[in-house]
Amino acid sequence: MMFDPEKRTAQLSRMQAARRQTQHQLDLIDRQITRKMTALIPLLGRRHQGYRRGKALAPGAFLERYRANLAALTAERQPEVDALTRKLARQDAAIAALRSRHPQFWFSKDGGGKAPSGGHPA
């Protein structure tokens, strides 16, 4: 079967760029959740009505409220995270399949290698 090594290299580069974009979207969601939780911390610690009336605060109340809010924010974004995670797995499988079909053209795992000049395996 005849094929152009430059086209395979370009195809791999496009696939890797798409994978990086998907990973970036997942990282962005994680940062958004972290940012929202960071903004909520001062609000979570302000529920001290009992303290003003002479009652002691519940020792784990803040942590409990923090975990509940984190779970709610995470659950809100979970369908999107799941879809992106599945997409990332498909992209990884497609990249691995492309590399396994023509292993002589890929020098490194990250795809940094280029096809040998002349279009024939060395």
Image (cartoon, rainbow, N blue to C red):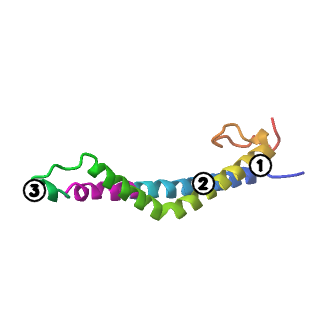
Observer-nearest of 74 and 1:
74
Measuring from the top left, give residue 63's x and y in whole percent: 31, 49
- Residue tagged 3: 52
Observer-nearest of 79 and 2:
79
Q: Residues within 10 Å of mark 1 (few under 14, many from 20)?
A: some
Observer-nearest of 62 and 122:
62
- Residue type (three-letter) at the residue carrying disc 1: Pro
Looking at the rendered structure, the secondary structure element under dot 3 is helix
- Residue type (three-letter) at the residue carrying disc 2: Arg
Within the magenta stretch, is there residue 43?
Answer: yes
- Residue tagged 1: 5
**Residue drawn at (83%, 52%), measured in percent from left and top?**
3
Measuring from the top left, give residue 75's x and y in whole percent: 47, 61
Q: CA distance from mark 1 to mark 2?
A: 21 Å
Cβ–Cβ below 8 Å for labels 3 and 1? no
Q: CA distance from mark 3 to mark 1?
A: 74 Å
Foreground mark, 3 or 1?
Answer: 3
Looking at the rendered structure, the secondary structure element under dot 2 is helix
Foreground mark, 2 or 3?
Answer: 3
Q: Which residues are magenta?
A: 33-46
**Residue drawn at (28%, 58%), measured in percent from left and top?**
39
Answer with left or right where residue 102 lies relative to residue 31: right
Measuring from the top left, give residue 45's x and y in whole percent: 22, 54
- Residue tagged 2: 19
Answer with left or right where residue 97 lies relative to residue 13: right
**Residue drawn at (13%, 52%), measured in percent from left and top?**
55
| Disc nearer the start of the sequence (2/3) | 2
Q: CA distance from mark 2 to mark 3?
A: 53 Å
Looking at the rendered structure, the secondary structure element under dot 1 is helix
**Residue drawn at (77%, 48%), measured in percent from left and top?**
5
